[in-house]
Amino acid sequence: MPNDLSDGYHFNVMRRAIDAIDAQDGPVSLEELAAQMGMSPAHFQRLFSQWVGVSPKRYQQYLTLDHARRLLADRFTVLETSLATNLSGAGRLHDLFLRWEAMSPGDYALGGAGLTIAWGWFDSPFGPALVMGTDRGICGIGFASETTEAAAMEDLTTRWPQARFVEDAARLAPWVKTAFGATATHDKAPLYLIGAPFQIKVWEALMRIPSGHVTTYSEIAAAIGHPRAVRAVGTAVGRNPVSWLIPCHRALRKSGALGGYHWGLPVKRALLAWESARADHEAAR
């Protein structure tokens, strides 16, 4: 991953490459991709491999329609075991957290009244990211590559209609750099979860899924003690306000289908592909 989070160049190259791949019915050669990016094949492959850890050809395999089904077959995590054993894995995102805490149900019912939330726009490996946080930690992350910045802002601000929102990217920057891997892992990014009690239980379960692995909505429902509440779990997953750090992209349907994703299925595919590629790269080292 790039060390300089302020430079979105590497992501923009990959985003355009993914768009080029999606526009084709079959594999796209290195030479074709490089030409579309306006680079030599060697330069494009070097930059791409530096960012994601694998070649463009290998990365295309992670973006195929049946990749999610292979993930479900090979890297399915039973959440009840994770909860019981505190299962961990290389690159597990919530290992970055110094702490996480949740707003009380009573405070949540007030719609954010009395709460000041700082916000700012940042380059991320997955496109423009709107990040929000209180003095206790990050409370919101949304992506705008498949929507608009205005839509992402409206989406997050309307979740806490009574809160006071203040633009302050500098205040959030240290947490953001940790969240997207631009600083050493000994730095920490706290989370502050603002949601209903049931939603927070679902989000906590999501944080138990190791990076590079997936689970299903029904397994999440069973893990939180509500095995029949699959539909409610799906709604709670979709309402997760802290995308990426609370990895709702790791929840799939039983069939292996991706299901929905609040910020667009291309973003979900990119998130899963990036994690799978990195997990394989780390395992091969």
Image (cartoon, grey):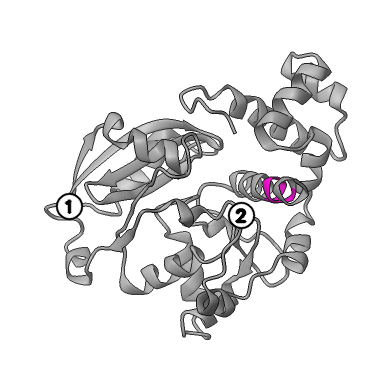
Q: Residue at x 22, y 64 (%)?
A: 108
Residue 80 in sight in this render? yes
Q: Nearer the viewer, mark 1 or mark 2?
A: 2
> Alpha-carbon neighbours of circle 1 within 10 Å: few (<14), some, or many (≥20)?
some
Q: Toward which corner of the image does residue 240 lie, by quadrant?
A: bottom left
Residue 260 in sight in this render? no
Q: Relative to residue 36, is residue 253 drawn left or right?
A: left
Q: Which residues are magenta?
A: 276-280
Q: In the rendered view, would you say 212 is above or below 156?
A: below
| Residue nearest the viewer, comparing 176 with 13 | 176
Q: Type of residue at label 2?
A: Ala
Place of residue 237 in the rendered image (x, y in percent of width and height, measured from the top left): 48, 64
Q: How many marks?
A: 2
Residue at the disc numbered 2: 90
Q: In the rendered view, would you say 140 is above or below 181?
A: below
Q: Residue at x 60, y 60 (%)?
A: 89
Work out which quarter of the rendered image holds the N terminus and state it. Answer: top right
In the rendered image, residue 250 lying in the magenta stretch gets the answer no
Q: In the rendered view, would you say 38 is above or below 118?
A: above
Which numbered circle lies on residue 275? Answer: none
Q: Type of residue at label 1?
A: Gln
Q: Toward which corner of the image does residue 119 lie, by quadrant?
A: top left
Label 1 close to label 2 by CB (< 8 Å): no
Helix, strand, or loop for circle 2? loop
Residue at the disc numbered 1: 162
| Residue nearest the viewer, comparing 62 with 148 | 62
Helix, strand, or loop for circle 1? loop
Q: Relative to residue 279, is residue 228 drawn left or right?
A: left
Place of residue 179 in the rendered image (x, y in percent of width and height, measured from the top left): 45, 43
Place of residue 40 in the rendered image (x, y in percent of width and height, measured from the top left): 80, 14
Q: Residue at x 49, y 34 (%)?
A: 182
